[in-house]
Amino acid sequence: MSDGWFKKSWTAARKSVGVSTVRFHDLRHTAGTLATQHGATMKEVMSRLGHSTTAAAIRYQRAADSRDQDVADRLDEAFGNPTSEPVAGYSRDEPDEGGEPDS
């Protein structure tokens, strides 16, 4: 496949779906991000994308940080403590005056 043929075909494909600014490499990034968001481990993402180090694969893990609340809820359910309200961020309860965390 020649570069000219690919560029012409890629440009036509982007235009037909209305995403003229998407680069071909963006599809690779999207695949890594979606795999992570659907439960793939870092090792699995590395294997799928051909990464030999964690440095490149870690960006896909960071992209899935928004799933933190989902993970926390599933852990709560697994241990018999279902939550009804989201837990804000990563903060812990502040210790009370006696040095014990609030319950």
Image (cartoon, rainbow, N blue to C red):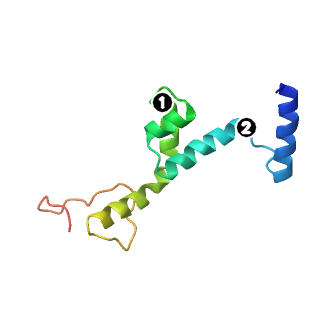
Residue at 26% x, 64% y: name it. 79
Front disc: 1 or 2: 2
SS type, badge 1: helix
User: Which corner quadrant holds the C terminus?
Assistant: bottom left
Residue at 39% x, 57% y: name it. 71
Q: Position of residue 95 (x, y in %)?
A: 19, 59
Amino acid type assigned to the residue bearing label 1 in the image: Ala
Quarter-of-image position of residue 99:
bottom left
Q: Is residue 88 or residue 42 the one in the foreground?
A: 42
Answer above or below: position of 94 versus 23: below
User: Which corner quadrant holds the N terminus?
Assistant: top right
Quarter-of-image position of residue 70:
bottom left
Q: Which label is found at residue 55?
A: 1
Q: Earlier in the sequence, mark 1 or mark 2?
A: 2
Q: Is residue 99 or residue 103 the one in the foreground?
A: 103
Q: Position of residue 77 (x, y in %)?
A: 32, 67
List the single residue furthest toward the front.
1
Answer above or below: position of 53 versus 72: above
SS type, badge 2: helix
Q: Which label is found at residue 24?
A: 2
Q: Is residue 87 or residue 49 the one in the foreground?
A: 49
Q: Position of residue 25 (x, y in %)?
A: 68, 36
Neighbours of disc 2 within 10 Å: few (<14), some (14-19), many (20+): few
Residue at 88% x, 35% y: name it. 8
Measure the alpha-carbon separation of dots 1 and 2: 21 Å
Q: Is residue 26 or residue 48 the one in the foreground?
A: 48
Q: Is residue 98 left or right of residue 46?
A: left
